[in-house]
Every structure is written in structure tokens, then in C-alpha cells.
Image (tube, rainbow, N blue to C red):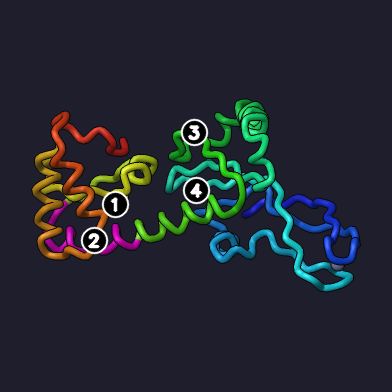
Amino acid sequence: MATKGVFRVECPHCGESFDADFWTVVRGDRDHDVKELILSGEFDLLVCPKCEEMVQHEEPFLYIDPTRDILAFVMPESYEAEKDKWIARMQADYEPVRGALTSGQGLTGEPLYFFGLGQLSAMLENDKDREEETEVMEFMAREDGLQLLPVKPAAARELDLPFTIPVKTGLAGRTAALSAAEALYAKNDALPRLKKLVDFLKTPGSETVPFLKKK
Ligand SMILES: [Zn+2]
């Protein structure tokens, strides 16, 4: 369940002050309706009870999705002018509760800091595309009897790769992943992140794939 708080808001249209509910913690993996509001941009929209005009009002909140290793402090866009101050404040608030928030949840605990809902929704949109592409790739991989290894979500975002890597069952390492990824890409070249995975695995480096998520 999402956690809510009550904040006082002043309507910029008629000057009326009113109390409104805001989410202070959103669980991206559970609060699907709230996540939809974030993606549609309606999350921080209110209706003034007096003049019935739309009022946009941002309050800081925490967005958590352990399945995607997201723990993000989402602050109003206006805070960006004093970015360092606010990040320091969020870090100070977070440190004492870090253990409780991350334990046993699959979170690495490295928080993200966003200023404005747009930064969060851009990342979520991107993750959604990545998820869809990963699902197509996984379906093909299963048909070929391949195994799927999870990628650390942060690495998948940084390198713009699928959330999983295909490998021949029982094998591991770069070479095994490369041949599986190449075989799948040969069958479906409409998967841009699979192409990036192929290119990434071709680049010389260590024999192991360093960004795999430990299970
Ligand atoms: Zn009003």
C-alpha cells in the first residue's frame, strides 16, 4: 500500500488554501494505479475545491521498486536549484532507515535522486520499453531451450541492455552469452537492446560478464 501524507496547498488561481493527500511512499511493484498516474503525468495534479481549477503541486516522495532495484527520492523540480543541499538532506534522512528499507528486498540500497516527476517517469517509460523487449527476447530464448540470467537493473539501464541475458543451459560467461544473443538476434533484428547486448559482449574485456545479478 502506498503511504499518504496531508499537506496544505494554496490554489494559484483563486488563492484558496486546502488540505490535500499526497503519496509519501510509492511501491512501484505493488501500487500499479499510482504508477500509472506517474506515467500519465496526473500524479501531482489536484482539483481546487473552491474554483475547481487544476492545481499542480509537488511534494517529495520515495519511489521504491525492489524488483527493479529502484529506491528513488523524487523531489519537486524547483528543488533542483539547490540540488546539493537537498541531496545531502535526503541522504541524512535515509541513512538511519537504510537497513530497514533495503533488507531482504533485493535493493542494493544505492538511492537515485530525481528533481521533478518527469525524470522519474522518463526512467519508468524506458524501463517499460526494456521490459517489453526483454519479454519478446525471453520468449524466443525459451523456445530455443536457452537459460536466462538476470542483469543488474542499474547496469541494464546504464548500458541500455535487456533485463536478462540468454545463455545455453549450463554455460556461463561472455562467449556463451554472445553466441546465444547472436543466434536470437539473427532471428529477430527488431530488438535494439539485444543488438546492444551483442555489441557489448563483442567488446574485448574479461571473460566473465561482470554485471550479472547475483541470485
Ligand atoms: Zn482555486
The three-letter amino acid code for the residue at tag 2 is Leu
Labels 2 and 1 touching (C-beta < 8 A): yes
The three-letter amino acid code for the residue at tag 4 is Asp
Residues in magenta, as a range: 132-146
* Residue designated by label 4: 65
* Residue designated by label 1: 162
Q: Position of residue 190 (x, y in %)?
A: 22, 65
The numbered dot on residue 109 is 3
Question: Mark 4 or mark 2: which is in front?
Answer: 2
Q: Position of residue 182 (x, y in %)?
A: 11, 53
Residue at the image point whose x is 64% and y is 40% from the top: 80
* Residue designated by label 2: 191
Q: Which quadrant holds residue 31? A: bottom right
Q: Earlier in the sequence, mark 3 or mark 4?
A: 4
Residue 117 higher or lower than 200, as above or below: below
Q: Quadrant of the C terminus?
A: top left
88 sits left or right of 16 in the view: left
**Disc 3 and disc 1: Cα gap in Å?**
22 Å
Residue lying furthest bottom: 52
Q: Earlier in the sequence, mark 2 or mark 3?
A: 3
Q: Position of residue 200 (x, y in %)?
A: 20, 42
120 in the magenta segment: no
**Disc 4 and disc 2: Cα gap in Å?**
25 Å
Report whether residue 172 is seen. no
Q: Earlier in the sequence, mark 2 or mark 1?
A: 1
- The one nearer the camera, 210 or 27, is 210
Quadrant field for ligand 1: bottom right
Q: Earlier in the sequence, mark 4 or mark 2?
A: 4
